[in-house]
Image: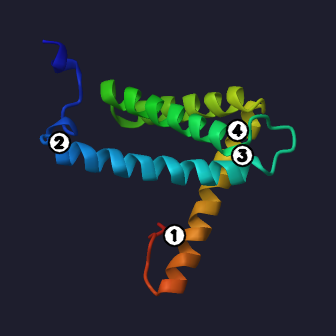
Amino acid sequence: MMFQIFNDDWLQSLDTIEEIMWFLVFYLIFLLIIAIFLKIALGFFSKARHTNFGQVFITSFLITIAFALIFLFMGGWLALVIAIILMWLIISFRHNIGFLAAIIVTILAFLIYILVAIVIGLIIGTTLIVLPF
């Protein structure tokens, strides 16, 4: 009865221990990538607190947990809007920057990620990221 409220599409892919371990490895890599670019973006704000890598890693962990919980129970655009606003609030409160600065940090982190992906793609001669424009 309780499992009827969950979005079970992604739960069906975690059948074995090996699949769970691969999921956790990719999750850790994803967290590291988020933390690296979030730390770089937070470095542009001189008044930001807790900018060492451990604190930023905890922030990225909290962001991914918030996204997972929201998308576990909801779906669609409303869930995405709620998750993004919650992400900005987490960044704002954890690093003592304003809400607008949290939005700018998120945009900067995303733009730096795209720039790095394009440069690495040019270096190795492949397309790592496909932009919609």
Q: Which mark is residue 88?
A: none
Q: Are marks 1 and 2 in contact (CB under 8 Å)?
A: no
Q: Which mark is residue 133?
A: 1
Q: Which residue is mark 2?
A: 17
**Where does residue 31 sit, x and y in percent of width and height?**
49, 46
Q: Which residue is mark 3?
A: 104
Element type at marker 3?
A: helix
Q: Which residue is mark 4?
A: 102
Q: Marks 4 and 3, Cα distance to the nearest angstrom?
A: 5 Å
Q: Nearer the observer, disc 2 or disc 3?
A: 2
Q: Are marks 1 and 3 in contact (CB under 8 Å)?
A: no
Mark 2 residue crowding within 10 angstroms, few (<14) / some (14–19) / many (20+)? few
Q: Earlier in the sequence, mark 2 or mark 3?
A: 2
| Type of the residue with mark 3 | Ile
Q: Earlier in the sequence, mark 4 or mark 1?
A: 4
**Where does residue 63 sit, x and y in percent of width and height?**
52, 34
Is 20 left or right of 103, judged from the image as shown? left
| Type of the residue with mark 4 | Ala
Element type at marker 4?
A: helix
Mark 1 residue crowding within 10 angstroms, few (<14) / some (14–19) / many (20+)? few
Q: Are marks 4 and 3 in contact (CB under 8 Å)?
A: yes
Element type at marker 1?
A: loop
Colour convention of the picture:
rainbow
| Residue in the image at 69% along x and 29% along y | 94
Q: Marks 2 and 3, Cα distance to the nearest angstrom?
A: 39 Å
Quadrant where the N terminus is found in the figure: top left
Foreground of the two, 111 or 24: 24
Q: Are marks 2 and 3 in contact (CB under 8 Å)?
A: no
